[in-house]
Amino acid sequence: MSELTISGLGLILCLAPAIVHAVEVYRPLWARWIVNWVLPFFGPGLPRPSKALTHVDEIAMLDAAIEAAPADKAPAGADYIFVMLFEQRQGALAFISLAAGILYGLTLPLADRHTLHFVFGIMAALFVLVNANHAGIPGLGHHPRVTRHGRNVGLVFGAFWVVVAALNWLGFTYALA
């Protein structure tokens, strides 16, 4: 495999978060499509329409979370839900921005890609840590509600991001050579 191919593959694989999450800029509750139609495969299992969350279900769950806040902290509870959805939208915007950088970077000669490989190598390495944490390995924080599907996602995507980090490290070294 050529150095340019390794570089391109390292960048292209970093498009995955944007491909999956970009739509959440417009509708953060559309993350349910991941829950409904992707996560069941990590069960392992198959998606079932009868088990799929609907928009109405999501709104009811969010309302229940807001209502669960102590009465004297109700505004803070509502703001917490707002911030979670706001941060989700900002995360999707960041992934779209990264995708734009990747697409631009693919037009550059290898020698000019070092900064992109540096940034995406770090991103991939941090994604390894987060996914490993979800898989049960301590490090980089604590997620208080990891599900069985979430643990399995951590196992699979932890390995995926190890490969992506390695490809970007190689791309970085090739670009500097």
Image (tube, helix red, strand yellow):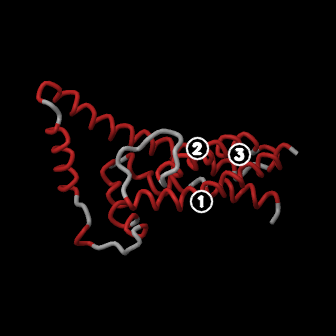
**Mark 1 vs 2, N-terminal side:** 2
Question: How far across and how far down the image is residue 49, in percent?
Answer: 26, 72
Task: Kindly report the distance in space between the C-alpha atoms of the residues bearing marks 1 and 3.
Answer: 16 Å
Residue that appears at 79% across and 57% down: 4
Residue type pointed to by label 3: His
Which residue is disc 3 drawn over?
117
Question: How far across and how far down the image is residue 3, in percent?
Answer: 82, 58
Relative height, residue 14 to residue 86 (above, below): below
Q: SS class of the residue under badge 3? A: helix
**129 sits left or right of 169 in the view:** left
Task: Kindly report the distance in space between the C-alpha atoms of the residues bearing marks 1 and 2.
Answer: 12 Å
**152 sits left or right of 75 in the view:** right
Q: Residues within 10 Å of mark 1 (few under 14, many from 20)?
A: some
Residue that appears at 74% across and 55% down: 7
Which residue is disc 2 drawn over?
126
Question: How far across and how far down the image is residue 23, in percent?
Answer: 40, 52
Which residue is disc 1 drawn over?
160
Residue type pointed to by label 2: Leu
Residue that appears at 71% across and 57% down: 8
Tags 3 and 2 touching, CB below 8 Å: no
Q: Is residue 12 visible in the rendered structure shown here? A: yes
**Which of 15/148 is in front?**
148
Q: Residues within 10 Å of mark 2 (few under 14, many from 20)?
A: some
Q: Residues within 10 Å of mark 3 (few under 14, many from 20)?
A: many
